[in-house]
Amino acid sequence: MAEEQDLTLDQDNAEEQGGGKKKLIIIIVAIVLLIGIAIGVTVFLMAGDSDESEDGAVTEGETAEVVEDIPTPAIYIKMKPRFIVNYNVGTRQRFLQASIEIMTRSQPVIAAIELHNPMLRNTIVGVLAEQDFKQLRTPEGRSELIDILHEQLAAVLQAEAGVEGIEAVLFTDFVMQ
């Protein structure tokens, strides 16, 4: 009886070893198949149709695709701290508090703004102080103020650093009391 049990155990081990070899062969075949497919797809994509002939020129009847310049992202420079200007309106004291940011896309303009920040801030305070308080309460007055600030700041940067490129002057906060 012991011999029968030994024979049964040996047959189970032999079946497990045979099944393991079959699994190993299937895995190897699958890996080789995947590598072959990957190589085939790569060759197909690399050898696809091209719009250009062998000498690099566009063939007759075909049009060249025009690549547009990708615009550089806008950069906003916050003028810190906020600007606070007081106005005498009749017998009352009035105040304007404004946060201003300058938009540009040029790195030389950013460097010039940082270098000449005191001069730019002085120009902004001077322009704000010259404004009529009642006029600033209207949308047209604020729009006109933005235009004046844009012109003045561009002139300062041109005179001091010789750079141009301020695209916009923006109010991010505009409080009047």
Image (spheres, grey):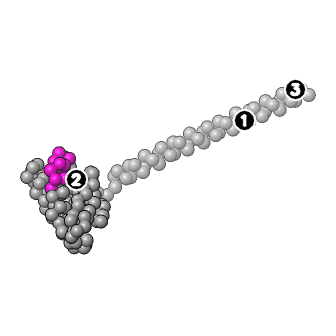
Q: In the image, what residue occupies the spot 22% across and 68% down?
A: 91
Relative to residue 17, is residue 94 drawn left or right? left
List x then y, in percent, for residue 176.
28, 65
Q: Secondary structure at mark 3?
A: helix
The amino acid sitting under disc 2 is: Glu
| Residue shown at 25% from the left, 53% from the top | 79
**Image quadrant in which you'd find residue 19:** top right
Q: Assign a secondary structure to mark 1.
A: helix
The answer to whether 36 appears left or right of 105 in the picture is right
User: Do the numbered discs 1 and 3 sit on residues whose CB atoms are within 8 Å?
Assistant: no
Q: Main secondary structure of the magenta part?
A: helix
Residue found at the far right of this picture: 1
Image quadrant in which you'd find residue 151:
bottom left
Amino acid residing under circle 3: Glu
Q: Earlier in the sequence, mark 2 or mark 1?
A: 1
Instruction: For marks 1 and 3, give the CA distance.
Output: 20 Å
Magenta stretch: give its range.
Answer: 111-123
* N-terminal-most mark, 2 or 3: 3
- Mark 1 = which residue? 16
Is residue 64 visible in the rendered image? The answer is no
Please state the horizontal and vertical placement of residue 117, each as a whole percent of the image. Answer: 19, 49
Q: Residue type at mark 1? A: Glu
Decide: marks 2, 1 in contact (CB < 8 A)?
no
Return the residue nearer the eye: 138 or 158: 138
Q: Of callouts 1 and 3, which one flags the residue occurring earlier in the amino acid sequence?
A: 3
Residue wearing tag 3: 3
Q: Quadrant of residue 126?
A: bottom left
Whether residue 177 is visible to the viewer of this picture, yes or no, is yes
Q: Neighbour class for label 1 at 10 Å: few (<14), some, many (≥20)?
A: few
